[in-house]
């Protein structure tokens, strides 16, 4: 939102080449320039002159009261002028939360592929750290992060032999995946209430569409009236395309017999298709449709590793492309193509993407161990986990060899 400059913000206006400034700038600018105004007033006010000036002018003490009252008015004005920006920011945040509540998430925790078929770069951290991912940020204190990593190591190491087997890692992956599922259920339950205002336990497509368009700036009552009377909604092409994709997903989440009314469990499938067999199959079909170039409804290695549309402009871009091909080739050959015949079927891709597939979790556990298993004993040891901390946590923890004894 832009507010008209009243003179105090001329510095901002002249820099931006306009007569108005965004409302979120007003609070800081008014406060800063009002502070300058206060200082100037203090300098001019007889009651607060320097000792030398007071001695020369002999300002009466009674002059202090009017000046203080005037300063109090300025302070109150500063506070009042700051409030609208705070309220505006709160409304914007509330709007963003509301939109996030009713839209399916772009990213699904603990799932190997994104919706667009890209590899989930955070998958290993998601299934190894679970809810503790936020504790391993880049700016986290290394010593504390090492200690937390060793605590996790101890939890994975069920038989306390100071090494992690593939079976122990598989159990841990399944446990972290279950945590993500519980989070998804709790999140979906809260979001379901937001789109089920009458509390009848069902949400119709029209009810959902009204809420969705309201988050896009449309008047909720007007949209509801237009839908009721089957009038044109007058929405832009991009929003219409999003609605059509959401409606396809809505149909898929609606269990037979279809009635276009989603229950709470069906709404969970709509938001988190990874936890519904039918919706997982729908995801797989969508990914294969996007990557399948010859129309056989299967994926060859060349189709799976083919680069997205775009041109390489420099060496850095070439390195990114090379990494894309290398990572996807390894994933295709080692994990997705179960029978190693060079072709991935829908069933194979579904097994690979199913977060609750124990066999897939075991294969993933073996791969995670192989990446850090420097002594090739098929186990993970504390030194190896710390050395390859960037793979497991997303952040590199230095001095792994020296610190392992003091942290474990």
Image (spheres, helix red, strand yellow):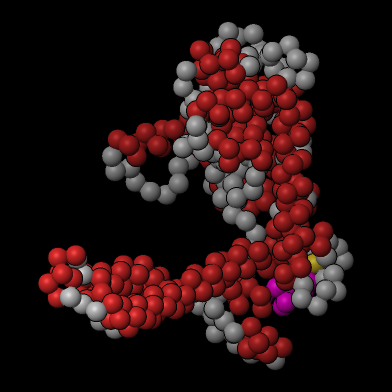
Q: From what the image shows, is residue 45 above or below residue 402?
A: below
Asked if one can make out residue 201 in the rendered structure from this viewpoint, the answer is: yes
**227 on left or right of 7:** right
Where residue 354 appears, as percent x and y from the top left, is: 73, 41
Please state which of residues 6 and 251 is positioned toward the viewer in this rendering. Answer: 6
**Boundaries of the magenta span:** 203-209
Please state which of residues 352 and 400 is positioned toward the viewer in this rendering. Answer: 400
Please state which of residues 229 and 52 is positioned toward the viewer in this rendering. Answer: 52
The quadrant of the picture occupied by the N terminus is bottom left
How would you classify the magenta stretch by its main secondary structure? Answer: helix
Where residue 117 appears, as percent x and y from the top left, is: 57, 46
Q: How many marks?
A: 0
Q: Going 66% across and 12% down the picture, which residue do you hit? A: 378
Where residue 216 appears, as percent x and y from the top left, is: 55, 75
Q: From what the image shows, is residue 248 above or below residue 175?
A: below
Please state which of residues 154 and 119 is positioned toward the viewer in this rendering. Answer: 154
Q: Going 35% across and 77% down the picture, which residue do you hit? A: 68
Asked if one can make out residue 289 in the rendered structure from this viewpoint, the answer is: no
Farthest residue to the left: give it.
56
Hey, which quadrant is residue 161 in on the image?
top right
**356 on left or right of 289:** right
Hey, which quadrant is residue 208 in on the image?
bottom right
Q: From what the image shows, is residue 241 above or below residue 7?
A: above
Q: Going 83% across and 65% down the picture, which residue do you hit? A: 263
Where residue 102 appears, as percent x and y from the top left, is: 66, 66
Asked if the magenta segment contains residue 75, the reply would be: no
Q: Going 63% across and 16% down the picture, which residue do you hit? A: 408
């Amino acid at each position: 939102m832009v507010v008209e400059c009243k003179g105090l913000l001329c510095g901002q206006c002249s820099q931006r080449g306009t007569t108005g400034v965004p409302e979120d700038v007003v609070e800081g600018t008014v406060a800063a320039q009002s502070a300058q105004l206060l200082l100037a007033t203090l300098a001019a006010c007889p009651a607060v002159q320097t000792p030398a000036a007071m001695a020369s002018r002999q300002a009466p003490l009674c002059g202090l009261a009017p000046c203080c009252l005037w300063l109090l008015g300025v302070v109150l004005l500063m506070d009042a002028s700051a409030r609208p920006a705070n309220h505006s920011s709160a409304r914007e945040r509330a709007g963003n939360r509301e939109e996030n509540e009713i839209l399916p998430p772009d990213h699904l925790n603990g799932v190997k592929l994104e919706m667009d078929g890209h590899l989930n770069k955070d998958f290993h951290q998601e299934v190894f750290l679970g809810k503790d991912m936020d504790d391993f940020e880049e700016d986290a204190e290394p010593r504390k992060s090492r200690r937390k990593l060793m605590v996790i190591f101890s939890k994975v190491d069920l038989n306390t032999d100071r090494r992690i087997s593939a079976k122990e890692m598989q159990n841990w992956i399944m446990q972290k995946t279950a945590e993500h599922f519980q989070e998804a259920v709790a999140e979906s339950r809260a979001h379901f209430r937001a789109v089920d205002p009458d509390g009848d336990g069902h949400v119709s497509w029209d009810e959902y569409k009204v809420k969705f368009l309201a988050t896009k700036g449309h008047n909720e009552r007007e949209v509801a009236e237009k839908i009721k009377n089957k009038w044109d909604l007058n929405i832009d092409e991009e929003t219409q395309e999003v609605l059509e994709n959401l409606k396809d997903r809505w149909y898929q989440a609606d269990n037979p017999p279809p009635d276009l009314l989603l229950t709470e469990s069906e709404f969970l499938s709509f938001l988190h298709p990874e936890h519904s067999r039918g919706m997982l199959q729908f995801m797989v079909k969508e990914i294969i449709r996007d990557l399948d170039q010859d129309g056989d409804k299967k994926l060859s290695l060349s189709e799976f590793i083919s680069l997205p549309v775009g041109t390489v402009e420099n060496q850095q871009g070439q390195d990114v492309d090379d990494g894309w091909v290398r990572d996807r080739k390894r994933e295709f050959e080692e994990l997705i193509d179960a029978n190693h015949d060079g072709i991935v079927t829908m069933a194979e891709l579904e097994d690979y993407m199913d977060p609750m597939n124990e066999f897939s979790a075991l294969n993933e556990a073996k791969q995670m161990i192989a990446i850090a298993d420097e002594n090739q004993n098929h186990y993970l040891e504390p030194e190896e986990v710390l050395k390859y901390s960037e793979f497991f946590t997303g952040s590199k923890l230095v001095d792994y060899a020296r610190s392992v004894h003091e942290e474990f």
